[in-house]
Every structure is written in C-alpha cells, then in structure tokens.
Image (tube, rainbow, N blue to C red):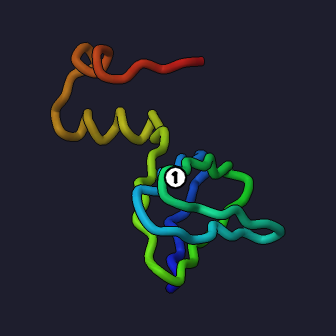
C-alpha cells in the first residue's frame, strides 16, 4: 500500500508511528517507520510518501503557518486579543 502525503508547504512534519510499520520515502532517501518510532520530516524533502506491506497507523504533527492560522481565526471572529493567548510566535 502507498500513501502520498499532502504538501509540506515549507514546514516540517513529525510522524509518530502508532502501529504497524512502513517506509517514508523521498527522492534520494528513505527511513523506516515502526511502532513507537517518531521521525522528523524536513520541508526540504518534499514530496514524500509512505509505503507499507502490513499497514501503518501514524499521527502527523506539524507547526502550522501562523499567518494563515491567524487569518482563519480572524475570519471566524476571534479577536487579536484572544489570539494572543492562543498563538505564541517564537521568533
């Protein structure tokens, strides 16, 4: 089975393998995923995919684009003051 991951868009992802096993592949490299393993996927390897023979359940975690997140929250009516308590930018 093969899974093509969504675009990274200049961000890195953290993949946490919950169960099963598979391989993260990209042009020029690959890394094995297995239960309990966590890997950082840098933005520079886009595109990437995951292949598995037996099934792989993973959780994908990433830092969102804060400008897009602020705009989306603003579109939902959340004030800048309330966002200040939710979004902490580390520059």
Across and down, in percent, residue 40 comes to 62, 46
Across and down, in percent, residue 83 comes to 28, 21
- Count of marks, rendered view: 1
Could you tell whether 8 is left or right of 67 in the image?
Answer: right
Could you tell whether 11 is left or right of 61 in the image?
Answer: right
Q: Where does label 1 land, which residue?
A: 15
User: Which residue extends farthest right?
Assistant: 28
Could you tell whether 49 is left or right of 70 in the image?
Answer: right
Q: Secondary structure at mark 1?
A: strand
Across and down, in percent, residue 52 comes to 54, 78
Residue 90 in which image quadrant: top right
Q: Quadrant of the C terminus?
A: top right
| Crowd rating for badge 1 (residues with CA inside 10 Å; few <14, some 14–19, many 20+) | some
Could you tell whether 76 is left or right of 80 in the image?
Answer: left
Residue sitting at x 23%, y 40%:
75
Residue sitting at x 57%, y 78%:
51
Residue sitting at x 32%, y 15%:
84
Nearer the observer, 72 or 1: 1
Nearer the observer, 73 or 32: 32
Residue sitting at x 55%, y 63%:
7
Q: Is residue 49 above or below residue 71?
A: below
User: Which residue extends farthest left?
Assistant: 77
Nearer the observer, 24 or 65: 24
């Amino acid at each position: 089975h093969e899974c093509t991951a969504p675009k990274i868009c200049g961000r890195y992802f953290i993949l946490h393998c919950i169960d099963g096993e598979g391989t993260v592949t990209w042009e020029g490299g690959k890394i094995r995923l297995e239960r309990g393993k966590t890997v950082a996927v840098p933005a520079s390897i886009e595109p990437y995919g995951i292949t598995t023979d037996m099934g792989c359940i993973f959780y994908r975690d990433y830092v969102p684009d804060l400008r897009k997140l602020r705009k989306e929250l603003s579109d939902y009516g959340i004030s800048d003051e309330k966002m200040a308590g939710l979004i902490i930018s580390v520059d």
